[in-house]
Image: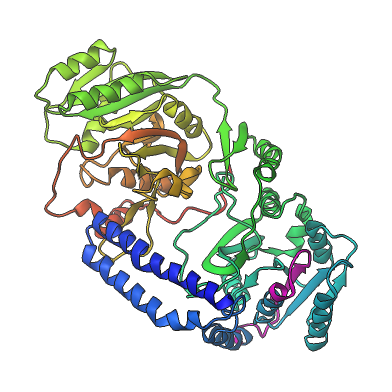
Amino acid sequence: MKKIKHFIYLLNQVRHNLLTRSWEFIKRGYEVGQLKRYMFFYCRHVFNFIRHFGGHLAAELGQGDLNSVQIKRLNQLTKGIHQLISKDGSFSYSILIALTSTTLVQFKNTLKSALQQTAPNLEILVGYHSLISADIQKFLQDQVNEHPHVKMVLLASIQEQTMLNELAEKATKDWLVCLGAKDWLRPDYLFRCEQLLRLLPADSYCLYTQTQPINDVGIELITRPASIDPRLPFPYSFQNLIGRSTMIRKQAWRQAGGLQFHPEQEGFWDLAWRLFLNGVKFEYLPFSLYLKCQTAQTSAEETALIPHLESYSKRLHLNWKWEKGLIPHSYRAIPALDALPTIQVIIPYKNQKDLTLKTVKTALQQQNVKVYITAVDNHSTDETIGQAIEQMGGEVLRIKEPFNYSRLNNLAVQQTKTAQHCDLIVFLNNDVELEPQALEEMARWITQPSIGIVGCQLYYPNGLLQHGGVDLLKTRPAYQMVWSHAEKMCSKEKQTSTKTLRVTDAVTAACALMRRQVFIEVGGFDETWYPIAYSDTNLAIKLQAKGLLSFYTPYASGIHHESVSRHCENIEDVEHSAWLHDHYIRHHQLKFSPKQANHVA
């Protein structure tokens, strides 16, 4: 029965790899104009999967991966290298395991993964209570007799959080790792963490890694960087992406007061906030080094953390209210608005009367904001569009020049006669229909510290996602920039990261809000090098050079009829090239680096 279940699991993996991922690769390759290159990478991925299929099939239930040839080789190689770099003995680790509800088979795998760690200066503290079964206690005693660095600690409490706090007090090493009694550590967990620690200055740090879910069958353990980088730009971090994968210095744990909140998932998130408020910096390792057994948690457990989050935001002088997010273990913060926002809405257009007037109407129907429309007519043959906009109270600038998206928006900021007093600017395509509270939500965030531009969630008319934040992919050919719309073309039920408030590398200017003064200070859109495309991502680069962040909110949304209002074909997509990106940064003396993991308001 075990092997049958394992075989069914692997068949599902085949379906995912050969069918689902094939569509993902084709779609991504088409989007960036590199279909052949992406198909080559996909074929290589399929080849590697088939090559390892036999090894997966031979794995035994619950322990196959820990006993696999791949893991044994990884453990042997890591152990040799780790012993060479750790001769100074300055790095020491305590792995804390609280035995609560687990089976003997599960605990054997957990302890084995801890014993496979290669750090010479290591102790494994296993806390247990009198209710733990006799066979588990006997197995544990045998391991203590065999391995001197494994220690049994009898505890009075049966509550896991309390047990971990007591184990932390008894730990004698500098760094603490909390390992769940059903979870695994990859053999190179401590080795990879120590590699990063040796690069960091002598400040207070907390390391965390990608967490990969496991169940009662095998998992894929191919060493590769994580596809998503779950960085924590506190306080602009609203999804619980941190947990037991964290490595915390014992001194920082004690100063923060250890675990103070139950349940486990929210407890570690609560601890992360207190560590951050105590000045601890978070560093991320982009590898799946912690393997967590999935457990269900209730909505009530998640909402219980909200009063704590409100308390932490108040300590940062942020007037935020909090509520449950759209997906599990996520939260929505709602900043207060001090005054009625006054917003200049800039809408360039050329013909497309029905779309343009719908866009203007939805902008004028925005709630709890004061909107001033500046429509920019670029060679429209239908003069009734501008007349209709003026009748609705908007102003129309008629620019009879060749199409230059960046210039049209810059001129609207400079030449407006009715909106010069507006503190805020929204750049809005004439094929976007906004929900009534979209601009109010965006205005809440643009007033927060270090936020330079705010984007919203945009859907195609068929309900698929068009924009949920723009990320710069790190795996790109040298001559090509891959600005990726996160989860583009995903339906609502399949979205994850785009359902949370988050800091992104950029947002689309199809609907983006900025402060007028900031837009002027960074020089607006670049009319020379980015006249049509990627002017918004270039703007994000200039904002980041000034320490300002791009921010995305899914609680402001609209429909985007993308590519309906403009058809443009370039001989060469120069604006998309890595050459221009690098050249621009170098000659403008900009600094474009990944968003920091510890942003202080």
In the image as oriented, which residue stretches furthest toward the top? 391
Residue that appears at 43% across and 45% down: 546
Where is residue 444 shown, x and y percent of the image? 50, 30
Residue 396: tell me if it is visible: yes
Viewer-nearest residue: 69 or 414: 69
Residue that appears at 52% across and 56% down: 230
In the image as oriented, which residue stretches furthest toward the left? 381
Quarter of the picture holding the N terminus: bottom right
In the image as oriented, which residue stretches furthest toward the front? 1
Q: Against 114, is 522 above or below?
A: above
Q: Which of the 4 quarters of the picture holds residue 439? A: top left
Residue 481: tell me if it is visible: no
Verify whether residue 425 appears in magenta. no
Where is residue 298 shown, x and y percent of the image? 66, 47
Viewer-nearest residue: 303 or 277: 303
Where is residue 432 shown, x and y percent of the image? 30, 31
Q: Which of the 4 quarters of the picture holds residue 236? A: top right
Give, as a single range, the part of the protein colored magenta. Answer: 84-107
Verify whether residue 102 appears in magenta. yes
Residue 175 shown left or right of residue 435 in the figure: right
Q: Which of the 4 quarters of the picture holds residue 158? A: bottom right
